[in-house]
Image: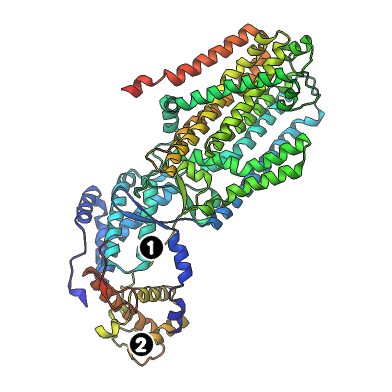
């Protein structure tokens, strides 16, 4: 048999890595010595190769098990420093083993270990805190700016939807009932008196509803906006329809209050939370349109790649949309009920609009250009 | 013979498995094999997760109810503003937000972790990973991808429920809504069957796929000890096989033999030892199968591995020996 041959089937990288690793952690020389002593007893060359490296593989496995369990704190600094080196050693062991060993169990183990190590070493690069810093410190607004054309399309659709809603209802008031979900006891119907409509805008509702109302609004609105985003998958058409439908309702309301000369009051009532909420819904729709557009016109890329790229970019926008809807829910649930004048309502709404515009389209642009 | 011919190439299963096999190329230039998860295991994982989510919601609801009951919700006059009333409201708010979060955050939280898997996926031994680019270069799983794939889950799974729910609350025809929900659900549930990688819509948008997460333990080294050198502890005999006696088998048979030896079950070893003896023309004894097989395995592997280093592979016993294709 070939027991006389002692040289190991090492690649150049393997030996270099081993040397650098030995330099890095010389305290493991004792364990390595033991491994080499055990390796002397193995008959097969490939088994000797394995026994000499086994300690490192097991060390890497132990580190990975801890990271996977989320116990990064329990890993010593030495182990953390050694992780990339150990990973590269396993990678090189695996490529050597593939060409030299027929031990199926060892190969399966190495492939599994290399895969797990790869997921750990090349896992999500940021922790939650780092992700937050990047998200609020420019990532969000950059993602919003990246879909500016789609935002313009969404805005156009929303304006068109409002106009359509107005025109439909002014042509035939029956449309109002088709657009507005029927709820018993709602005074906001065609033919309502000015006083009734005025009361719906300024009468303080029962106080105990505030918080629950805000939470309910948030939950409901985020579902609508997620739907708006997710349906972009069907080439963006359902997103557009959803935008038009929702704003047609707005148009119908505007028509109703305009008939009684309460347009400005309604705008104030809507704007306090609406500038944030409608902005969020516009962004959600724009995200849907962006995905749809990338899939319909992928350009040089494969459709799948284009969809994935668009999906990841707009996921950042959508995270922001959910946050905006929380803000909108708070404004609608609390601020609107507490501020009972049109002028301050308009001021708050206007301030929010300016804030969002500045944050998205001014903040961080200089950094991006640099 | 019997055991080998029985285990030989379960052809249909192998092709089904190889159809799920993918290779990604890491930054180190390593070709890392991945196996895509089956649709069945993904569905099972989802069911487990949904059960857990529902249990979590029920548990938290019960806890909140208990708190409300402890405060004395049933005795409070709703029209009077009191501290207890405010507390009840806060509880309702917490409940609404929990239900909203449980749906999305369960999947988000677990898939963003180092394991890349929800508890259901973990139980089934699968995880999510980023799809590689078209040239096979491995990509990093990002938080954005995880968010995107879970936002889509919302409409794939929960939309039908919303259909039926809204029809019921509006007093409309629930049969129609039921059919609409069924069609909707069908489209998304069948989507993975119509693409090569078994992607659901969320995977397409996020650029992810679901792969098996191997958890194989490192077995013992086979060629350590006296028996690997051909020495039998029972009889004191030394098994030495000639080149011709080793040349009858290839890599496939070697791996079957490895499995038999690692399982270490007497009847299987006896059967295989008999089969080998019949093939190479030895008269088989009884009682010393382990040592015999150890010796044969070690010498066969040594022979095949030497050939391997010289570029000669022998895949199985039918293979006449050829030069391995240059990869």
Choose between A19 and A124: the one closer to the eye: A124
Q: Position of residue A24 (x, y in %)?
A: 24, 47
Q: Quadrant of residue B280?
A: bottom left
Q: Is residue B295 shown left or right of residue A259?
A: left
What residue did someone put label 2 on?
Answer: B279
Choose between A358 and B221: the one closer to the eye: A358
Q: Position of residue A359 (x, y in %)?
A: 46, 19
2 vs 1, front mark: 2
On-image quarter of the N terminus of chain B: bottom left
Measured Cα–Cα span from mark 2 to mark 1: 29 Å
- Identify whether A50 is placed above or below A334: below
Is residue A226 visible to the viewer in this orientation of the structure?
no
- Identify whether A359 is placed above or below B56: above
Is residue A214 visible to the viewer in this orientation of the structure?
yes
Q: Is residue A33 shown left or right of residue B152?
A: left
Circle number at residue A108? 1
Circle number at residue A346? none
Labels 2 and 1 within one chain? no
Q: Position of residue B65 (x, y in %)?
A: 73, 36
Q: Which residue is at 61% across, 44% downward?
A: B157
Extreme residue in the bottom direction? B283
Q: Position of residue B227 (x, y in %)?
A: 32, 79
On-image quarter of the C terminus of chain B: bottom left
């Amino acid at each position: 048999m070939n027991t006389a041959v002692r040289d190991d089937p090492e690649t150049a990288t393997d030996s270099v890595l081993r040397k650098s690793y030995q330099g890095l952690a010389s305290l493991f020389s004792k364990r390595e010595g033991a491994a080499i002593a055990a390796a002397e007893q193995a008959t097969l060359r490939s088994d000797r190769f394995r026994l000499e490296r086994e300690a490192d593989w097991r060390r890497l496995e132990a580190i990975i098990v801890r990271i996977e369990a989320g116990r990064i704190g329990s890993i010593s600094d030495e182990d953390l420093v050694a992780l990339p080196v150990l990973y590269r050693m396993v990678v090189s062991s695996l490529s050597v083993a593939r060409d030299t060993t027929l031990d199926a169990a060892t190969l399966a183990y190495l492939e599994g270990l290399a895969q797990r190590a790869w997921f750990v070493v090349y896992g999500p690069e940021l922790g939650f805190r780092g992700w937050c810093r990047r998200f609020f410190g420019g990532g969000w607004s950059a993602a919003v700016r990246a879909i500016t054309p789609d935002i313009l399309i969404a805005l156009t659709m929303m304006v068109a939807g409002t106009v359509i809603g107005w025109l439909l209802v002014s042509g035939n008031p029956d449309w109002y009932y088709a657009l507005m979900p029927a709820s018993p006891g709602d005074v906001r119907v065609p033919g309502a008196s000015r006083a009734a409509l005025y009361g719906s805008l300024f009468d303080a509702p029962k106080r105990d509803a505030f918080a629950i109302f805000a939470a309910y609004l948030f939950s409901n609105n985020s579902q609508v906006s997620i739907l708006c985003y997710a349906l972009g998958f069907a080439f963006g058409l359902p997103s557009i329809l959803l935008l038009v439908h929702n704003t047609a309702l707005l148009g119908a309301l505007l028509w109703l209050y305009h008939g009684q000369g309460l347009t400005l009051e309604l705008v104030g009532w809507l704007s306090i939370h609406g500038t944030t909420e409608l902005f969020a819904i516009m962004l959600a729709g724009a995200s849907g349109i962006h995905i749809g557009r990338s899939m319909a016109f992928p350009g040089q890329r494969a459709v799948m790649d284009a969809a994935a790229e668009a999906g990841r970019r707009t996921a950042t926008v959508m995270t922001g949309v959910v946050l905006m809807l929380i803000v909108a829910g708070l404004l609608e649930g609390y601020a609107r009920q507490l501020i009972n004048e049109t002028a301050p309502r308009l001021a708050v709404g206007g301030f929010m609009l300016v804030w969002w515009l500045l944050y998205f389209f001014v903040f961080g642009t200089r950094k991006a250009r640099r | 013979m019997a055991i080998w011919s029985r285990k030989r190439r379960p052809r249909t299963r192998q092709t089904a498995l190889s159809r799920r096999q993918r290779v990604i190329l890491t930054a180190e230039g390593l070709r890392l094999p991945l196996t895509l998860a089956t649709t069945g295991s993904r569905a099972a994982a989802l069911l487990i997760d949904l059960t857990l989510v529902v249990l979590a919601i029920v548990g938290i609801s019960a806890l909140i109810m208990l708190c409300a009951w402890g405060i004395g919700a049933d005795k409070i006059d709703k029209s009077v503003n009191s501290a207890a009333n405010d507390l009840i409201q806060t509880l309702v708010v917490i409940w609404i937000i929990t239900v909203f979060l449980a749906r999305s955050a369960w999947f988000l939280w677990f898939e963003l972790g180092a394991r890349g898997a929800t508890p259901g996926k973990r139980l089934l031994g699968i995880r999510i990973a980023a799809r590689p680019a078209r040239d096979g270069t491995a990509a990093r799983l990002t938080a954005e991808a995880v968010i995107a794939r879970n936002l889509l889950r919302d409409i794939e799974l929960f939309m039908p429920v919303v259909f039926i729910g809204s029809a019921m609350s509006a007093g409309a025809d629930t049969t129609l809504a039921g059919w609409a929900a069924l069609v909707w659900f069908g489209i998304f549930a069948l989507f993975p069957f119509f693409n090569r990688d078994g992607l659901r819509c969320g995977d397409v948008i996020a650029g992810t796929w679901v792969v098996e997460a191997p958890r194989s333990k490192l077995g013992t080294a086979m060629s350590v000890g006296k028996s690997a050198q051909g020495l039998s502890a029972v009889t004191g005999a030394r098994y030495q096989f000639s080149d011709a006696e080793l040349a009858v088998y290839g890599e496939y048979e070697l791996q079957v033999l490895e499995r038999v030896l690692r399982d270490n079950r007497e009847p299987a070893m006896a059967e295989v030892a008999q089969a080998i003896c019949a093939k190479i023309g030895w008269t088989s004894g009884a009682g010393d199968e382990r040592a015999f097989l150890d010796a044969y395995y070690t010498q066969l592997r040594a022979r095949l591995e030497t050939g391997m280093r010289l570029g000669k592979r022998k895949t199985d016993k039918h293979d006449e020996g050829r030069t391995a294709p240059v990869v």
